[in-house]
Image (cartoon, rainbow, N blue to C red):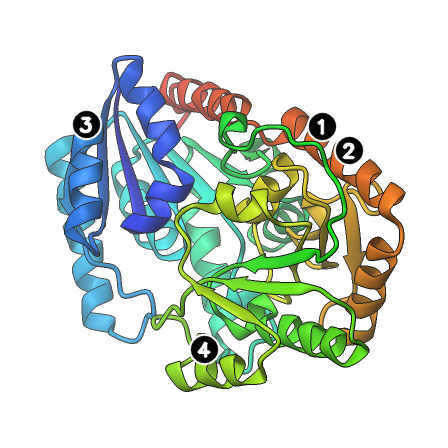
């Protein structure tokens, strides 16, 4: 098959979909990628992997209507000239812009819903009409008769099935984008004298950065010896992003170690005792939680879509209410004061990740879907 991926930005494709593309290439398919290229390094990496690149700039802030229109026409022209057998759309704008294009051309399409984002949150940046517009557009693009809509959690699937007139049979549930177990070797868990508590995410307020900082501050006042590591960089295209001034304020607290952007997540998790993602953002299925579980790290996260789906409460981690400093502090104290329970959770987290998040299984599920919709003729 000739397959085109349409993704908002290159680094997201590399972290979340490159492994699927590499398996397609390995088995003889032709793989194209339409995306925003951010660095020469990423361009070269993608070309070395064997992908055919098409640079289509996506305005992730969605503040430039002309650029949105340009992206739509550029992808539509790509469809007409490349004539793919299948299109895989990932993230909001490619789902909507690309979905309108494939609706017109009737190209078999996989829609990847990797979280519903700020449009379905209670973000203070949300315009009242935006969710209605996005819901309408999803309803429109889902009219494509040759499609599969892939969700990462049941909450997102239930919501779009009920609001977008989406047949349940046209959906699939795949838990995340896959984790390579070989990158996260099994380790013998122990509670060190100075435990390391880590958070890794884009530095967005809605990811729970403030809550993590408050947690570190609480433990500092309690004089409990714990290192708090915050890994991640701002995302200027996102209205919830921290600014340079915000990061300076965090550094001034003196209770956090700011790591900046970290490429080597396995090394970070290798030295992590407990991983925390206090997000109040509607996630898909956070890859970093899947990675932490694969590394045998007990996880504390929130009762939010995606986050709660990645953890079995009390077995592979703990789930707390979002934006609740007290619950977060109590949960961390509980784990640190119960090393036997901590070790049990570590073992269970690893086994759960092997059974549910392994890269091989996730890739296999995608390939089954590709073959299903590419070779099933439309009845229209």
In the rendered image of this protein, does residue 29 appear above or below residue 313? above
- The disc, 3 or 2, on the residue closer to the chain's N-terminal end is 3
Q: Earlier in the sequence, mark 1 or mark 4?
A: 4
Q: Earlier in the sequence, mark 4 or mark 3?
A: 3
Q: Position of residue 127 (x, y in %)?
A: 48, 80
The residue where tag 3 is placed is 50
Percent of width and height locating residue 237: 34, 70
For disc 2, the marked residue is: 348
**Which residue of the protein is positioned furthest toward the front in this rendering?**
193
Please indicate whether residue 224 sits to the left or right of residue 185 in the image.
right
Q: Secondary structure at mark 2?
A: helix
Q: Tag count in the figure?
A: 4
| Residue nearest the observer in this picture, 82 or 337 | 337
On residue 242, the disc is 4
Residue 193 vertical placement versus 215 (above, below) = above
The answer, for residue 152, to whether it is visible in the render is no
Separation (CA) of disc 3 from disc 1: 34 Å
> What is the secondary structure assignment of the residue under circle 1?
helix
**Front one among 367 and 204:** 204
For the residues marked 3 and 2, what is the alpha-carbon distance in whole angstroms? 38 Å
> Residue drawn at (22%, 29%), measured in percent from left and top?
49
Which numbered disc, 2 or 4, marks the residue that appears first in the sequence? Answer: 4
| Mark 2 in CB contact with mark 1 (< 8 angstroms) | yes
Q: Quadrant of the N terminus?
A: top left
Q: Which mark is residue 365?
A: none
Q: Quadrant of the C terminus?
A: top left
137 sits to left or right of 48: right
Q: Quadrant of residue 189?
A: top right
Q: Quadrant of the rendered structure where residue 347 is?
A: top right
- Residues 341 and 116: in front is 341
**Residue 239 shows in the view:** yes
- Quarter of image, res 108: top left
């Amino acid at each position: 098959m000739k397959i085109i991926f349409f993704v908002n930005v290159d680094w997201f494709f590399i972290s979340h979909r490159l492994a699927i593309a590499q398996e397609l290439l390995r088995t003889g398919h032709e793989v194209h990628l339409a995306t925003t290229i951010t660095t020469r390094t990423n361009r070269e990496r993608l070309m070395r992997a064997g992908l055919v690149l098409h640079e289509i700039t996506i305005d992730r802030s969605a503040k430039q209507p002309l650029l949105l229109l340009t992206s739509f026409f550029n992808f539509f022209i790509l469809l007409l000239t490349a004539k793919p057998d299948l299109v895989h759309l990932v993230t909001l704008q490619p789902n909507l812009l690309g979905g309108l294009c494939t609706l017109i051309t009737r190209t078999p399409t996989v829609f990847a819903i990797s979280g519903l984002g700020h449009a379905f949150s209670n973000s203070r940046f949300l315009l009242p009409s935006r969710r209605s517009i996005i819901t309408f557009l999803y309803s429109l693009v889902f009219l494509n008769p040759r499609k599969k809509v892939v969700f990462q959690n049941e909450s997102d699937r239930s919501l779009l099935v009920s609001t977008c007139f989406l047949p349940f049979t046209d959906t699939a549930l795949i838990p995340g984008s896959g984790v390579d177990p070989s990158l996260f070797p099994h380790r013998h868990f122990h509670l060190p004298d100075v435990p390391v508590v880590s958070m890794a995410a884009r530095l967005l307020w809605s990811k729970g950065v403030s809550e993590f900082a408050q947690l570190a501050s609480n433990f500092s006042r309690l004089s409990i010896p714990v290192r708090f590591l915050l890994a991640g960089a701002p995302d200027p295209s996102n209205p919830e992003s921290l600014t340079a001034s915000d990061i300076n304020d965090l550094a001034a607290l003196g209770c956090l170690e700011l790591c900046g952007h970290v490429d080597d997540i396995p090394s970070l998790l290798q030295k992590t005792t407990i991983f925390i993602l206090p997000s109040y953002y509607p996630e898909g299925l956070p890859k970093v939680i899947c990675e932490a579980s694969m590394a045998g790290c007990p996880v504390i996260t929130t009762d939010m879509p995606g986050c709660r789906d990645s953890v079995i409460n009390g077995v592979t981690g703990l789930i707390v209410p979002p934006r609740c400093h007290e619950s977060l502090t109590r949960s961390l104290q509980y784990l640190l004061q119960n090393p036997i329970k901590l070790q049990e959770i570590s073992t269970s987290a690893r086994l759960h990740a092997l059974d549910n998040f392994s890269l091989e299984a996730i890739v296999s599920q995608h390939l089954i879907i590709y073959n299903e919709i590419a070779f099933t003729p439309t009845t229209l």
